[in-house]
Amino acid sequence: MLWILLAIGLGGYIGLCVVFLVAQRSFIYRPTPITPAHATALVLEVPDARLRISARLHDGPKALIYFGGNAEDVAYAVPELAAAFPDRAIYLMHYRGYSGSSGRPTEASLRRDAQALFRMVHARHADVTVAGRSLGSSIAIRLAADEPVSRLLLITPFDSILTIAKRVAPFLPMSLLLQDTYESWRDASRVTCPTLVIAASDDELVTAADTRKLLQAFLPGVATLKVINGTDHNSVSAKPEFWEAMVGRSRPD
């Protein structure tokens, strides 16, 4: 009788692992529907997809590229970014499957897309700041490690999605199952441009320990930290202190 119960339990556990293995990307990526344009819409052609880029075009040498969170329609960020950076062209990438971009998102494909966007923008603007929020922070870190980024802005960044997944579902062998691990700490040591890490004091997803691990991965003197008090993972950008930090008008912690 005992072995039957053990077999049933083991079968159920294996079944749960299989379900996660098949459906895991639906937990990471939450595509947003097409919404009315809040900015100029550009199309970036890559070998296997057509990517929608929301933009505020601006002549001159300066630009900012923004990579959003896993459920963010980045078009809504255009007005605030344009107001904060009036002297920069603004480019925001809609990930594959998000808001009119074709294809399906994976870590490898989003990283390739980010590099293609950077190279397009850098051909037009010599001074490119890159910003990334949550999921987008990992994309931004790798990009800054590989390309001549002038400044890096990281909003509620994590050290690794694998770390978060292990915390959320400690009963699953995430190291074996998770395909898109976004291990930002591995790339951070190759970043040389000035980097600002913006953390929320009451972040319910990215812990202070996660933030410390990421900060420790940067070379000495590269990254500084600014904690926005009274905010969580989603509300961090609602405080004036956030925008003061973004544009460099506040002291790091």
Image (tube, rainbow, N blue to C red):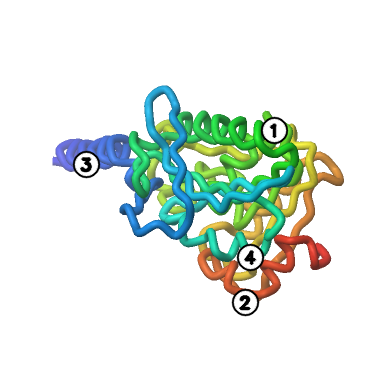
Q: Position of residue 16 (x, y in %)?
A: 26, 42
Q: Pointer 3: residues within 10 angstroms few (<14), some, or many (20+)?
A: few
Answer with the quarter of the image where residue 218 lies.
Answer: top right
> Badges 1 and 2: C-beta atoms under 8 Å apart?
no
Q: Pointer 1: residues within 10 angstroms few (<14), some, or many (20+)?
A: some
In-image side of 250 versus 122 (left or right): right
Residue 83, numbered circle: 4
Q: Pointer 4: residues within 10 angstroms few (<14), some, or many (20+)?
A: few
Element type at mark 2: loop
Residue type at mark 1 is Ala
Residue occupying image coordinates x 80% and y 67% = 250
Element type at mark 4: helix
Residue 12, numbered circle: 3
Element type at mark 1: helix
Residue occupying image coordinates x 78% and y 61% = 248
Q: Nearer the viewer, mark 2 or mark 3?
A: 2
Residue 145, numbered circle: 1
Q: Position of residue 217 (x, y in %)?
A: 73, 41
Spatial CA distance of label 2 from label 3 is 42 Å
Residue type at mark 4 is Ala
N-terminal-most mark, 4 or 3? 3
